[in-house]
Amino acid sequence: MLKIGIIGCGKIAQVRHIPEYYAHEQAEIAAYYDKTFARAQAMADKYGGKAYESLAELLANEEIDAVSVCIANHMHAEVTMEALQAGKHVLCEKPMATTMQDAEAMVETAERVGKQLVIGHNQILVPAHRRAKELIDQGLIGDILTFRTTFGHGGPESWSIDPGPGTWFFKKDAAVFGAMADLGVHKLYLIRYLTDQKFRSAAAKFATLHKRDASDQPIKVEDNAICIFEMENGIMGSMTASWTYYGAEDNSTVLYGTKGMLKIYDDPNYAMAATLQDGERIYFDLEGIQTNESQTKSGVIDEFIAAVLEGKETELAGRTALDSMRAIFAASESAKQGRTIFIEN
């Protein structure tokens, strides 16, 4: 039985981490910390365990085996490394860090102290993406040539623990990035998983088109990011991350291969559909993807606990996440410089 500490008791902790630990037969939530103590106490009252008034006190508890880091982006690296050095396994929410140096330091720290570092990239665990990977590996659509992938919804201000234009997601000092690191990072991790290729280059445009802060000024992070990526084997594709999709959420991915195409979460009736070169169409009726309005079990907690208890390498390992982080920072640099940025792996 693993004893778990929750660091940050905001929305992602409340709807995913805490309920999934609570339901897991090999986990017990022992501790909670949040800068707003009342949130931590509310979770302790509901699920059991102790609310701590300081992070240091929680990390000093030697009975705690592992922690979930569910705080604002700018604190991910610092708190993760503190927890690792305190002897805890760490599940960190995405994006794992706000600089490449910090991301690499997190991985180095985990490997040096011999603890698991897992990043919450839940999209590769959903049924359609798992099945898509199998079909690609089996050669259903031949060799992938191009792709397009999109993740867009109406923005985090309606979902955040502090809803409205004052949400930390809109604050440059806390979030650092906007839609790119909130949504785009999921799609980059997914493309890396589906193609089994690292990113070679990025060309991107970031913009703040509509979102405004509590002072009714344009937010200082991007609400839209449109990017073109090239993979190491020459596959090319586009990725769009947006907080201004005010109709239905779009979380689709389409892969175009030498024998056909595979559309994932692109059809309102089927989770996945393949159209082959000879005209054959194959439809797959699988579980729908999670949305802000429809939360389902992510699988991330199961993966983390298994990694800790079995000491196994996981597809969500911090070292694997470095590839998508390099792509994010390359895209950001491309947006600033107005040119293609090549990625060193």
Image: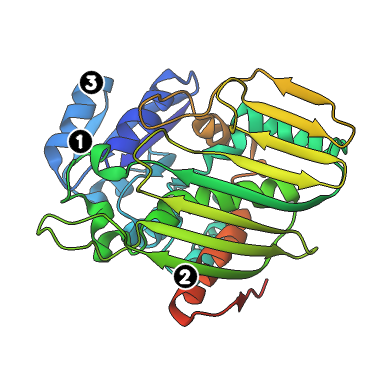
Q: Helix, strand, or loop for circle 1?
A: helix
Q: Helix, strand, or loop for circle 3?
A: helix
* Residue 302 vertical placement versus 95 (above, below): above
- Separation (CA) of disc 1 from disc 2: 34 Å
Look at label 2 and name its amino acid.
Ser
Quick one: 82 or 335, which is closer to the camera?
Answer: 335
Residue position for label 3: 46
Residue at 51 percent across and 75 percent down: it is 334
Query: Do callouts 1 and 2 mark residues in contact (Cβ within 8 Å)?
Result: no
Residue 40 numbered tag: 1
- Separation (CA) of disc 1 from disc 3: 10 Å
Q: Residue furthest left?
A: 215
Tell whether 267 sits left or right of 36: right
Quick one: 35 or 204, which is closer to the camera?
Answer: 204
Look at label 1 and name its amino acid.
Ala
Residue position for label 2: 332
Residue 92 visible from this viewpoint: yes
Could you tell me which quadrant the C terminus lies in?
A: bottom right
Q: Helix, strand, or loop for circle 2?
A: helix
- Separation (CA) of disc 3 from disc 2: 41 Å
Among numbered discs 1 and 3, the one appearing first in the sequence: 1
Residue 132, horizontal then vertical, whole percent: 72, 34
Among numbered discs 1 and 2, the one appearing first in the sequence: 1
Q: Residues within 10 Å of mark 2 (few under 14, many from 20)?
A: many
